[in-house]
Image (tube, rainbow, N blue to C red):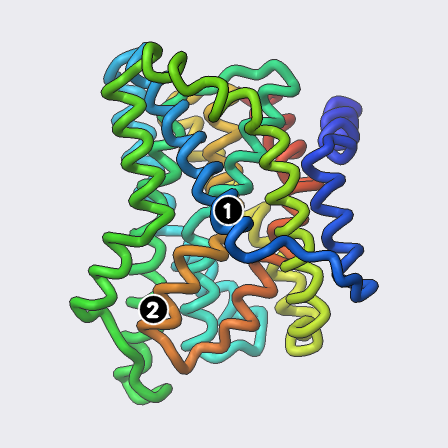
Amino acid sequence: MQGIIDIAVANLLAPMVLFFALGFIAALVRSDLAIPDAVAKGISLYLVMAIGFKGGAEVAASGISLSLVLALLAGGLLSTVIPFAAFAILRFATGLSRINAGAVAAHYGSISIVTFIAATQALNQFGVSYDGHMVAVAAVMEAPAILAGLLLATGLARSGDAPGGGGLDRELLREIAVNGSILLLAGSFLIGCITGHDGLTIIAPFIVDPFKGVLCIFLLDMGLIAGRGFTRSGPKLDWRTVAFGLYMPLIGAAIGYIAAAVTGMETGSAALLMTLSASASYIAVPAAMRLALPEADPAISLTLSLAITFPFNLTLGIPLYVAVAGMAL
């Protein structure tokens, strides 16, 4: 127990987390502090590219292995199963409609790449190693959750429970396939695999040394967005729905832990798989839901994923997942 507390305190006092808290507080007090949209988008691209490239370089150094294949299979399965669990819980425990429950379930089956990056930084801080191929697992866990969430929502909509949505049409499938964050992450990972350690050495001054500082700026912006979203949309959520945003990460992490144990992952990789399973998307999935389920209320899913689950994982969840993986595996 003391170990969990020590890790939590260390993570809470990390600069990245404190900058997120600064942004959140600034939004709550209605400060005019803001990060220009173009700058925020550029930083997002930088972070995704950097983490993908470094992961690919590490895979190039270690080679293709059975652990990589098992991890990819586990990630795809988790991203398919977790939306069904989230949907069942939402329908039983909250007053959300089936359409909104399906949209929220898709968010929680998918992943937050920023939460993943924060977890890798925490592991580095605590001196815990992990497999570079976990970046590929993160990329694999985007699309299945979107498809599963839409199956839950649109399948039920066609039964007459709700007005028809966009469904699984060709335009939606294309949107998923060419989503910018997925494409950049997978592409950077592939380039890292091709160029290996030599490629990493060439661009290390760009993607290694500045990484943590850039992450601080990004999390400051995330804090601003989360705080404003909570102020604007929080009143739409009753306590049962808010509670879901706090306990669903723990359920997802528990499912992720089982998958990590079955596939024989070591502590660091298991903690990352738990983190991915516990996180909720606020980039790729909202874009897909906007196209496929225009009648779903984005304020509900975004407030849950960004203003409730994201800060929970950033402050308390990641230290807990690292500690549990370290004690149990």
Which residue reaches farthest right? Answer: 29
Q: In this view, does 132 lie to the left or right of 24?
A: left
Upstream in sequence: badge 1 or badge 2: 2
Residue pointed to by mark 2: 152
At 53% from the left and 45% from the top, the residue drawn is 278
Measure how far apart labels 1 and 2 are at the Cα level: 18 Å
Q: Position of residue 22 (x, y in %)?
A: 77, 48
Quadrant of the snapshot with the N terminus: top right
Q: How many marks?
A: 2
- The residue singled out by tag 1 in the image is 252
Name the kind of residue labelled 1 in the image: Gly
Position of 81 with respect to 11 (left or right) is: left
Label 2: state its secondary structure.
helix
Q: Residues within 10 Å of mark 1 (few under 14, many from 20)?
A: many
Quarter of image, res 5: top right
- Check disc 1 and report its element: helix, strand or loop: helix
Task: List x then y, in percent, for residue 212.
Answer: 61, 29
In the shown orientation, is residue 328 left or right of residue 31?
left
In the image, farthest residue toward the left? 170
Query: In this view of the protein, can residue 98 be seen by the observer?
Result: no
Q: Who's the residue at 41% across and 69% down the image?
A: 102
In this view, 104 is above or below 18: below
Callout 2: few (<14), some (14-19), or many (20+) C-alpha neighbours within 10 Å?
many
Residue occupying image coordinates x 57% and y 49%: 249
Is residue 300 depicted above or below 227 in this figure?
below
Q: Residue 253: where, in percent of width, then height?
A: 53, 41
Q: Can residue 240 be seen in this view?
A: yes
- Callout 2 amino acid: Leu
Residue 225 shown left or right of residue 32 in the figure = left
